[in-house]
Amino acid sequence: MSPVNLLCFLLLAGSLFFFTAGTVGLLRFPDLYTRLHALTKADNLGLGLAVLALMLRAEGWAEVFKLGLIWLLVMAASATLCFLIARGARQRGQLPWTQRPS
Amino acid sequence: MNEIFLGAATWLLLTAGAGFWRLARWPGGADSLLGILLFGTTGTAMVLVLGAALGLPRATDIALVLALLAVVLGAAFVLRSWPPEPKPKEDHEPR
Amino acid sequence: MWALFDILLLLGIVFLAWRALADADLFRGVMQFIGLGLLVAVAWVRLRAPDVALAEAAVGSGLTGALLLAALARGERRQARTAQTASSPEQPNPAQTGAGAVSPKREHLYRAFAAAVGWLIFGLAAWAVWPLPSASDGLALEARTRLSESGVSNPVTAALLNYRGYDTLLEVAVLLLAIVGVWSLRRADVAVADSAARPLFDSLLRWLLPLLMVGAGYLLWIGSFAPGGAFQAGALLGGGLVLGRLAGWGQRKTPAAHYWRAGLALGLLAFAGVAALVMKHTGGLLQYPAGQAGPWILAIEAAATLSIGLTLGALFAGGRPSNEPISAEPQESPDHE
């Protein structure tokens, strides 16, 4: 496998790892706030790695620019949405999960 | 190389599916909002990777449109129609 | 390997479609509907149909989801209002349970009838489609051979605006009818202009809205030679209007209603106007003069983009602009955010 393809493969593998981590977090974390962490951070990092992998195979700089734009857009949008969701939940009285004393 | 992208797309489909499955099983409420985030990030990645697997040159445009509209949807959900918490036989919570 | 992906995708689509309809919690159902739209867009990509995937992602999933959410929010607010005024503590929420006033036996009968009709239609469609040759291209060959005369190089746009331009003209008319219907029924929601209370959202919009405009222009332009076109571009424009409305922009100084009306009608007027003009020249309905089809198509698409965007934004607002002079008939009180 050529070095570019190898790098592409590694980036994709990393991306899938982070996406899986995000979903595991969504499934297993105890409350809305922690799940937001999982979805916004892990999934966006996964998307970023996938975008990098695709940039390696892009044809031309316009494509590279578009891919980077997509990633920045999704990051900024997820961050803002995450904040809005968390603030809305807090305003409606949803309290963060705390560790129960054992 | 295309097979690798296809495998990645399949995996993403599975993770998104697991996310939606969980959201369908557990009681609704604010968790529905998480579905929008899931749709935004995983959906964009899925379209991008699938486009690469198929050799479709215009998949980036589709992903761009998806990303843009995911923001619109998320904002509409959070700011306009916050889902009420599911309560047994009780009336609505104060806005 | 493709088979695995296809099967998973199909299962996901069927599952989400079932849940979107069957879920008792309507908000969750709408979220599943949006997820369904995403999976269907992925399916279109899988079928190598990027134009349809764009349209599905933009209109079918994005804007329709936003409209459903707005309607759901209105229903909730009305429920809360009537619950408060009626002061009955144990009012079952029809929005949550979907209950009607029909006896269970009747309901079973209706369901069985609906299921029978559904299966009948499905059977007829399957019986019609089954004997078709699987490798047939339909009219695709003819469409591609005449593509050079059609004025554009994207076969989908050529089909929409040249070969079957009349259909698209009627589609634009249908959109106008939809907004006329909505405007006849109610007034727009009054949103609170509190963008100062949401500085993060406001700052997001400051670069997102220009990006949406540019994206709309981009999609409109590349529709001539790549997947894109007026409907997708209009959906992005509509998304921008939806965001602006959510941020409370333009609330204190709503543009006068006649600007809205002009913009909404512009698409249909331009399309019909072009149709009349070329009919005068060449004698056929929407028969563009030879070699001039490209600019006409672009002009029509530009006008249609504006109209479609305004229509979707106005549908999200839910009614005619609020600062219209009130007529004599009783109005329902405008919903407040």
Image (cartoon, coloured by chain):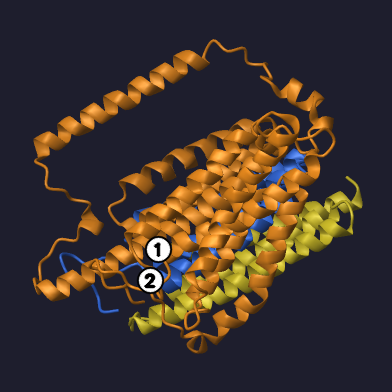
Chain colours: A yellow, B blue, C orange
Callout 1 amino acid: Gly
Coordinates of residue B80 in the picture (x, y in percent)? 41, 71
Callout 2 amino acid: Asp
At 25% across and 79% down in the image, what residue appears? B94
The answer to whether residue C244 is visible is: yes
Q: Is residue C105 above or below residue A35?
A: above
Please state if A8 lies on the left or on the right of C134 as rendered. Answer: right
> Disc 1 to disc 2, how far (Cα)?
6 Å
Coordinates of residue B55 in the picture (x, y in percent)? 78, 40
At 26% across and 30% down in the image, what residue appears? C114
Quadrant containing the N terminus of chain C in the rendered view: top right
On the image, numbered disc 1 is attached to which residue? C318
Q: Where is residue B43, by image quadrant?
A: bottom right
Please state if C25 lies on the left or on the right of C230 as rendered. Answer: left
Please state if C30 lies on the left or on the right of C93 as rendered. Answer: right
Q: Are marks 1 and 2 on the same chain?
A: yes
Q: Where is residue B92, by image quadrant?
A: bottom left
Tell me the element at label 1: loop
Q: Which mark is residue B15?
A: none
At 28% across and 70% down in the image, what residue appears? C77
Coordinates of residue B58 in the picture (x, y in percent)? 75, 47
Q: Nearer the viewer, residue C142 or A67?
A: C142
Tell which subunit mark 2 falls on. Answer: C
> Answer yes or no: do the residues labelled 1 and 2 have beta carbons within 8 Å?
yes
Tell which subunit mark 1 falls on. Answer: C
At 59% across and 75% down in the image, what residue appears? A79
Please identify the residue farthest to the front as the structure is shown: C280
Tell me the element at label 2: loop
Q: Nearer the viewer, residue C233 or A38?
A: C233
Which badge, 1 or 2, comes first in the chain's sequence? Answer: 2
On the image, numbered disc 2 is attached to which residue? C189
Please state if C111 lies on the left or on the right of B63 as rendered. Answer: left
